[in-house]
Amino acid sequence: MKLISFRCSIALLLSMFCCPFVLAAESAASSTQQTSTNTPFLWDNATVYFLLTDRFYHPHNQKSDQQNTHTHLAYGRKDDAARLRGFMGGNLAGITARIKDGYFEKLGVNAIWLTPPVEQIHGYTDEGSGKSYGFHGYWAADFTSVDASLGTSADMRELVETAHAHGIRILLDVVMNHIGPATSVDPLWPSDWVRTAPICTYKDIPSTVSCALVKGLPDIRTESNANVDLPPSLVAKWTAEGRYEREMQELDAFFKRTGYPRAPRYYLMKWHTDWIRKYGVDGFRADTVKHVEPEVWKEFQQFASATYEEWKRKHPTEKLGDEPFYMTAEVYGYSIDQGQNFAMDGGSTINFFDHGFNSLINFGFKSDANKDPENLFSHYSAQLTGALKNKSVLNYISSHDDMQPLDVDRQHAIDAGTKLLLSPGAAQIYYGDETARDLHVSGAEGDASLRSMMNWDELQNNVIRHGVAIEDVLTHWQKLGKFRHDHVAVGAGVHQKLSDHPYIFKRSYSDQHITDKVVVALDLPTTQFTTIAVQGVFENGQILRDYYSGHTAVVIDGKVNFQSKYPIALIALAAQELK
């Protein structure tokens, strides 16, 4: 059975079903939804929204706005980059604005993954497709500062505080592997800090770790224990900014307190964890993980965790919960089928879960999602309750650098959302997945096409793409996302098929603190109201809610009928049953 068969049915019903009873029921149901404050949170069930800050939203200055005044071009940067390879105006305040207007909450998002907001190289590289600037955040020049094109320290603080106030955690992207490339205005850091050769060949662990990822990208000597002085470019920069003495006093105190040598990796650990200490970020997404010694990550995680606990003690009213610091890893090429042991070339394997990571990004999902739902869901549940018990993966369908996303043409955006948001494991939404943002941009080369501005204008104008209105795509993702948000069993529970025709399954989760269970029905007929069997999961007399239609129904003889003609039902106890 494939979900593609009911894509058009959902879209049609979303846009045309206007029965007064349905609308009234949806309105009534929405008023009794669980809120962010009383819904349990598990990272294993998280819905993580991944965005490039520069490409998401500017509250006053969209790139498409004819009044663009280039206020986003800091440090002498110019608007002369190749297509989609320069700064375009999104900023931290834009993310905060969208948190405040409820965009993320309506989508069920409970964590936002930010690309590194640290100050980027001021210049550009000029190879292949033309000039490229560090809008993406992965070309650091100064790990201690917010890039002025994205905002200020105050903007970063407001973003985290606003997110926490709305029940949303912040996952910060961190880079231990490399700094930004040298340019005409950005000098190369000293050779005791970085190397530019050899280029990684991936034949074994040394040729994956002790090497430069690509030509021109300086690799940090994370293996070194030698004392090194601050790079001269930072000395000059901090002196010009009037903060050299303060920064050095902090570094001196850090090294005295920890006893660490003044080696490159410990400078970075201090600088990265300062974002926890200053702002209260709740976790790290670690970049290029397999290119850094595994023991470094474990050491880093321990220090980050201690810093987070210290922040929570000092900010008891600002923390969202008592769960420990969270870290997820980009181990390029990892898939859920590899279990806990990632195969490095040369016959070696590394268990990154044993080196500080709670989860790994699952690069295999975008191909696994081509399977029928039952094969996909049952297989993932078996892995997460078997080889990966007490571990997790972060599933995704598209990202900022994966040139082979699921549904690259956005022909099946509704189906893609169904599979991603209902699969066991945590889910990563890449900005615009939920609005069918175009991944083919004329004039953009390589991964630049994956990094266009968020298509707010298309959403506002309700553009039709492949026969489906973008607003209807978003509505579908919102319904599924809210269901995930309110029910940890969806991503963290055990999967069990209940019926083949129609396809019905249950998810159940239970530990000493949380018990949750749901039933999901897919491919329901759209020409009639369907009775759905829920015996063995819910009891007669219980009131259930369908999160898709918004209707409620009482269980009679082990069955419910929500008087809905949608092809999908997302079933759980109604709010009144949870009191």
Image: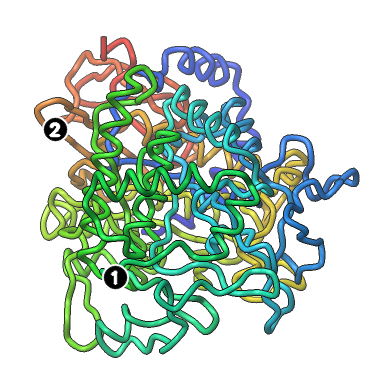
**Residue nearer the viewer, 119 or 558:** 119
Q: Quadrant of the C terminus?
A: top left
Q: Residues within 10 Å of mark 2 (few under 14, many from 20)?
A: some
Picture coordinates of residue 536 (x, y %)?
13, 31
Q: Mark 1 packing: few (<14 Cα in 10 Å), some, or many (20+)?
A: few
Type of residue at label 2?
A: Ser
Q: Position of residue 425 (x, y in %)?
A: 29, 49
Q: Is residue 307 found left or right of 166 in the rendered image?
A: left
Left or right relative to 448: residue 112: left
Task: Give residue 123's position: percent from left, percent from top.
Answer: 69, 67
What residue sits 25% from the left and 44% below the top? 257
Amino acid type, mark 1: Ala
Check residue 510 in the rendering and tell me which mark sits there, or answer none: 2
Distance from disc 2 to disc 1, alpha carbons, whole Å, reads 49 Å
Residue extending farthest front: 245
Residue of label 1: 226
Residue 30 image point, x, y percent: 48, 18
**Depth order, front residue of 462/44:** 44
Quadrant of the rendered structure where residue 444 is?
Answer: bottom right
- Quadrant of residue 188 in the image? bottom right
Figure disc tally: 2
Q: Is residue 351 left or right of residue 491?
A: left
Above or below: residue 369 compared with residue 479: below
Quarter of the image for the N terminus: give it: bottom left
- Residue 451 visible somewhere in the drawing: yes
Q: Is residue 7 visible?
A: no
Work out whether residue 269 or residue 365 is closer to the camera in this orientation and state it: 269
Question: Which residue occupies the extreme right position in the image?
Answer: 66
